[in-house]
C-alpha cells in the first residue's frame, strides 16, 4: 500500500503521516532526507529525532539515490520529505532528479506500506524564476506521478486531513 501526504508549510502533514504510520502493525522505518547543512538544519533534525525517539521508528538518513537504499523487507516506511529529496537530487553535484520516482518504486517493492510526505506547490501566489521555478516544476511533476501511483492521497490543511484519493482503512 502507498500513501501520499501533501500539504503546505506547517500544515500538519508530517504529524498526520507519523500518526498514520504509527497506526500500522509491524516495523517502522523513517527515511530522513534533510541534509544537516548548518546549525539551523542540525537543530531541526535533532528536534525531529527527539520527537520520534520513543515512537518505535528506526531512522535512516538518505539524501539522494533511493535505489541504493537497502531496507528491511515488509517495513512500514515513512519518507520525510519529497521536497528535500527532490532538491537534493536536483542541486547536488552527484544528484539526478530522474532517480526520484525510480527510488520510490524501489522502496515500494520492499515495503509493506510506504508513506511519502510532500509539499504542495504553486499556491503561494508568487511568480518564481530560474532555479526555484525549475525545482517547483520538477516537484509538481513528481507529485503528479506519485499521486497517480498512490493508493491513498491525503491533503492536510490546518491540521485537517482531506481525502483526495482512496479510502481510509
Image: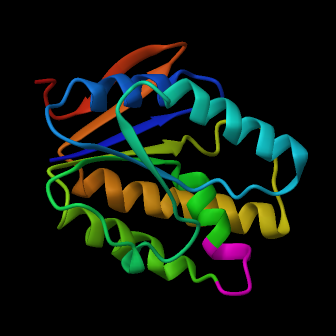
Of residue 152 and residue 28, the one placed in the foreground of this image is: 28
Q: Is residue 156 visible?
A: yes
Identify the image quadrant of residue 8. top right
Of residue 99 and residue 75, the one placed in the foreground of this image is: 75
Where is residue 86 drawn, in percent x and y?
58, 64
Q: Is residue 126 visible?
A: no
Does 12 appear above or below 7?
Answer: above
Where is residue 162 drawn, in percent x and y?
35, 20
Q: Residue at x 30, y 64 (%)?
A: 71
Q: Quadrant of the C terminus?
A: top left
Where is residue 28 drawn, in percent x and y?
29, 41
Does 129 appear above or below 82?
Answer: below
- Magenta residues, as a range? 89-94
Outermost residue, bottom side: 94
Q: Residue at x 43, y 24 (%)?
A: 54
Q: Residue at x 66, y 64 (%)?
A: 87
Residue 52 part of the magenta segment: no
Outermost residue, right side: 39
Q: Residue at x 74, y 86 (%)?
A: 93
User: Relative to 120, is 142 on the left or the right?
Assistant: left
Amino acid at each position: 500500500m502507498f500513501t501520499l501526504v501533501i500539504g503546505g508549510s506547517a500544515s500538519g502533514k508530517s504529524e498526520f503521516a507519523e500518526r498514520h504510520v504509527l497506526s500500522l502493525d509491524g516495523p517502522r522505518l523513517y527515511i530522513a532526507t534533510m541534509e544537516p547543512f548548518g546549525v539551523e538544519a542540525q537543530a531541526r533534525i535533532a528536534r525531529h529525532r527527539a520527537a520520534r525517539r520513543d515512537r518505535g521508528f528506526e531512522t535512516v538518513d538518505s539524501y539522494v539515490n533511493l535505489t541504493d537504499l537497502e531496507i528491511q523487507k515488509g517495513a512500514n516506511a515513512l519518507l520525510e520529505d519529497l521536497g528535500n529529496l527532490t532538491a537534493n537530487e536536483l542541486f547536488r553535484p552527484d544528484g539526478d532528479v530522474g532517480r526520484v520516482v525510480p527510488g520510490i518504486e524501489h522502496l515500494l517493492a520492499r515495503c509493506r506500506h510506504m508513506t511519502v510526505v510532500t509539499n504542495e506547490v504553486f499556491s503561494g501566489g508568487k511568480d518564481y524564476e530560474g532555479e526555484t521555478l525549475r525545482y517547483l516544476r520538477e516537484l509538481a511533476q513528481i507529485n503528479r506521478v506519485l499521486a497517480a501511483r498512490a493508493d491513498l492521497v491525503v491533503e492536510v490543511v490546518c491540521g485537517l486531513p482531506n481525502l483526495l484519493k482512496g479510502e481510509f482503512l
